[in-house]
């Protein structure tokens, strides 16, 4: 694309953003002083791999509970993890707390105003550093999220599939980012991708960049960006142990601090492995030696790199026996759990829809 067409992007985009911007709780109005860095940082961490509608209630809840970076830093990490439950990608929550502590304890509560300084903080990568620098400090940093990738791929008609096209798209982002109002420009590009230049059926007639968009001229906007074929997602299997007290409370445990869902509450389960479990084999991982019953139905949860297929065994104990079992007891509806664990609890049997599976120490189990 000729260089003369590249410089046309910022002006029409900002003009459109001034009129059609989304009003979001972590944003200042167009042209106004930037929102405080703590709010920008918190929102950007939450928005990684998560949609705006899903983030808004979490952002509001976090801000009410921890209104400053010092408040968040002082909170127990377990409280932060539980408040994050349901938002996914739980390493982000652990790094959120680590970053808050670093800013509070080492930097006096002041976030760095440069991409380089922000990159030194836990949990802040290239995209997040650029977004915070641009939006909170109005630095001309080139921001690149999925929406912006899509807009640029169409405007410049980039045929190289993602992710191979990312370096080229980043160079283009750097070339079009203006020196003035770079934060509004980044947010305008995000809004354009979210509302008009959408993945399917882009509304090209309403797009402020239509006169500069090569893909629109060629009639190929809906086909871009191209994506390389994905490998099949591996499948893992587990059996959840749904153990209830007489009052209906379920047994939960705390996962180790490191690894997938680290530090979160979990439903006890057999190790997640590549091959399906036989009930009799899985019982060696049960949290108690009782008569387990096979719950009807199954569930599935898709993580980034694999899918987890879940079946369940159900059991009941009285209060005296429950007191001897390691873990904590909570009513199913009260527990702050990751989505995958909520799906496990969704297999709790209704009525008598179970089949007996005895513990091997008390008899042979059915598989």
Image (cartoon, grey):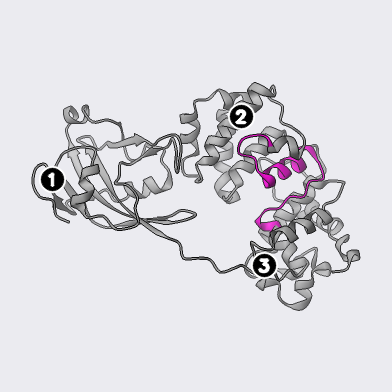
Residues packed near mark 2 inside 10 Å, few (<14), some (14 to 19) or many (20 plus): many
CA separation, marks 2 and 1? 48 Å
Range of magenta residues: 120-148
Q: Is residue 8 magenta?
A: no
- Along the polypeptide, which appears first: circle 1 or circle 3? 3
Horizontal side of 333 relative to 147 (left or right) equals: left
Q: Quadrant of residue 362?
A: top left
Q: Are marks 2 and 1 in contact (CB under 8 Å)?
A: no
| Picture coordinates of residue 110, whole percent (x, y) | 72, 27
CA separation, marks 1 and 3? 55 Å
| Picture coordinates of residue 65, whole percent (x, y) | 55, 29
- Along the polypeptide, which appears first: circle 3 or circle 2? 2
Nearer the observer, 3 or 328:
3
Q: Which of pointers 1 and 3 indicates the residue nearer the eye?
A: 1
Which residue in the structure is indicated by mark 2?
A: 100
Which residue in the structure is indicated by mark 1?
A: 360
- Where disc 2 sits, the SS reads helix
Q: Is residue 135 magenta?
A: yes
């Amino acid at each position: 694309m000729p260089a003369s067409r590249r410089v046309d992007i910022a002006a029409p985009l900002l003009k459109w953003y001034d009129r059609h911007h989304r009003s979001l709780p972590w944003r200042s109005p167009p042209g106004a002083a930037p929102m405080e860095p703590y709010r920008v940082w918190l929102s950007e961490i939450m928005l990684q791999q998560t949609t705006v509608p899903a983030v808004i209630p979490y952002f509001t809840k976090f801000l009410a509970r921890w209104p400053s970076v010092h408040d968040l830093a002082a909170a127990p990490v377990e409280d932060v993890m539980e408040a994050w439950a349901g938002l996914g990608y739980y390493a982000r929550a652990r790094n959120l707390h680590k970053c808050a502590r670093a800013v509070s304890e080492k930097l006096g509560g002041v976030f760095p105003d440069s991409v380089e300084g922000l990159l030194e903080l836990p949990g802040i990568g290239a995209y997040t550093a650029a977004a915070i620098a641009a939006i909170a400090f109005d630095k001309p940093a080139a921001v690149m999220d999925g929406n912006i990738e899509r807009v640029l791929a169409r405007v410049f008609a980039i045929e190289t599939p993602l992710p191979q096209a990312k370096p080229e798209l980043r160079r283009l982002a750097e070339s079009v980012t203006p020196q003035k109002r770079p934060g509004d420009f980044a947010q305008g590009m995000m809004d354009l991708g979210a509302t008009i230049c959408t993945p399917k059926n882009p509304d090209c007639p309403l797009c402020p960049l239509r006169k500069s968009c090569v893909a629109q001229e060629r009639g190929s906007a809906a086909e871009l960006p191209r994506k390389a074929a994905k490998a099949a997602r591996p499948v893992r299997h587990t059996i959840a142990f749904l153990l209830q007290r007489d009052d209906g409370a379920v047994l939960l445990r705390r996962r180790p601090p490191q690894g997938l869902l680290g530090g979160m509450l979990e439903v006890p389960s057999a190790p997640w492995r590549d091959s399906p479990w036989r009930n009799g084999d899985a019982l060696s991982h049960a949290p108690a030696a009782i008569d387990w019953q096979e719950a009807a139905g199954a569930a599935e949860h898709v993580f980034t790199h694999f899918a987890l297929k879940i079946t369940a065994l159900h059991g009941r104990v009285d209060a005296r026996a429950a007191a001897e079992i390691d873990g904590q007891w909570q009513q199913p509806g009260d527990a702050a759990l990751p989505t995958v664990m909520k799906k496990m609890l969704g297999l709790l049997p209704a009525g008598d829809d179970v089949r007996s599976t005895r513990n091997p120490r008390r008899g042979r189990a059915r598989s």
